[in-house]
Image: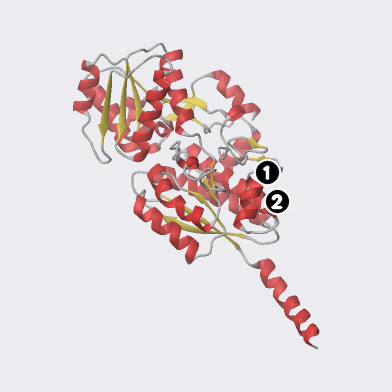
Amino acid sequence: MRALLLLLALWFCAPAQADEPIRIGVSGPFTGGSSPMGVSMLNGIRIAASEINATGGVLGRPIELVERDDEARNELGAQIAQDLIRNERVVAAVGIVNTGVALASQRFYQQARIPIITSVATGSLVTKQFVPPQYPDNYVFRVSANDTLQAEMIVQEAVDRSGFRRVAILHDSTNYGQLGRDDLQVALARRDLKPVVVERFNIGDVDMTAQLRRARAAGAEVLLTYGIGPELAHIANGRVAIDWDVRMVGSWTLSMSNFIDNAGPNAEDARMPQTFISMPVSARVTSFLARYREVTGVERIPVPPAAAQGYDSLLLLAAAIRQAGNTEGHAIREALENLHEKVEGVVTEYYLPFTRGDHEAIKGNHIPFVGRVNQGRVVFAYDEDRQRAARR
């Protein structure tokens, strides 16, 4: 009789367990100056979730996104991570846009042994906080171009391709800006170069005249930037206000809509690394762009790389859960580190994107493109990059 009751209990519980959603935490700045990145990322993640659920979910269970706005605030990001882990019982997380938020919050995922795939934050330290041997296992992964890679590309574009030798660095005072500045200086040092001036600004600053005048007085031929859209627009507008025709080459955030819109014609020809450019170069990209328009009702993605990276992040996480066969954190981490399923993202096609010692998906054959602002949108700076994108 006891055995029969146990079998009946299991029979009645099985459907409920099979239908129980897989809860995935999603956090990012959905309001404020960083929101173009956060909203784009969130929409990409939502599109991926809807496609996964439309085909039966993962392990027979639907994906449920638990979304939180971190407002690009480090302390709020840390609080959200703890809430998602302790109260919402998420089994994994994707998202995070700002490097400072990532560094403040991902430690809680690490302590809980819950994998997180960073979709946007690019600070080089993001995936290196918890590496062996100090930590036996690292639960932080990333699907964006880290700043070491970006800084090298920025310097290649400004120095190697364009021939500028006297460079100025303008960076914001956040973790993102300061770590990016350091990466730029390392990339310049490899070419036996030093910046003629390094200037700093704060989030919310609107007048960059003093920094720009000092850069011009130092003989700068090009401005290398690390900041986000609103302040970058003030730099672009400020150089025109002082009648200084100097190119801007910077991190991927020069593609943000609130840089391009606020700078208007002064944004023209700004150049930056891009993992994804919103041009229909392949059937896969064309389909994603159409799906984004369908879901959001808008023609323009505020920050296309953030949307694409968010989309790809959730596809990779879903593939890892399928391979693991369960939602245990350690099993998902192990699957991510040895992922055999080919995942067709929109940034690229992934096969074995991570290893135990390397949690960066964007590397090797997946080096980003150089984008440039042209008439209010980001396009490929070089036709060879357009051709390479069509082959991905």
Q: Is residue 262 above or below residue 24?
A: above
Front residue of 233 and 217:
217
Is residue 51 visible in the rendered image? The answer is no
In which quadrant of the rendered image does the C terminus lie? top right
Q: Is residue 240 left or right of residue 24?
A: left
- For disc 1, the neighbor class at 10 Å (few under 14, some 14 to 19, many from 20) is many
Residue found farthest to the left = 210
The Cα–Cα distance between marks 1 and 2, rounded to whole angstroms, is: 7 Å
Displayed quadrant of residue 151: top left
Residue at numbered disc 2: 323
- Amino acid residing under circle 2: Gln
Q: Which residue is mark 1?
A: 339
Q: Residue 136's x, y, as percent? A: 56, 48
For the residues bearing labels 1 and 2, Cβ distance under 8 angstroms: yes
Is 55 positioned to the left or the right of 375 in the image? right
Q: For the residue labelled by badge 1, is the local secondary structure a helix, a strand or a loop?
A: loop
Q: Quadrant of residue 312?
A: top right
Answer above or below: position of 27 versus 155: below
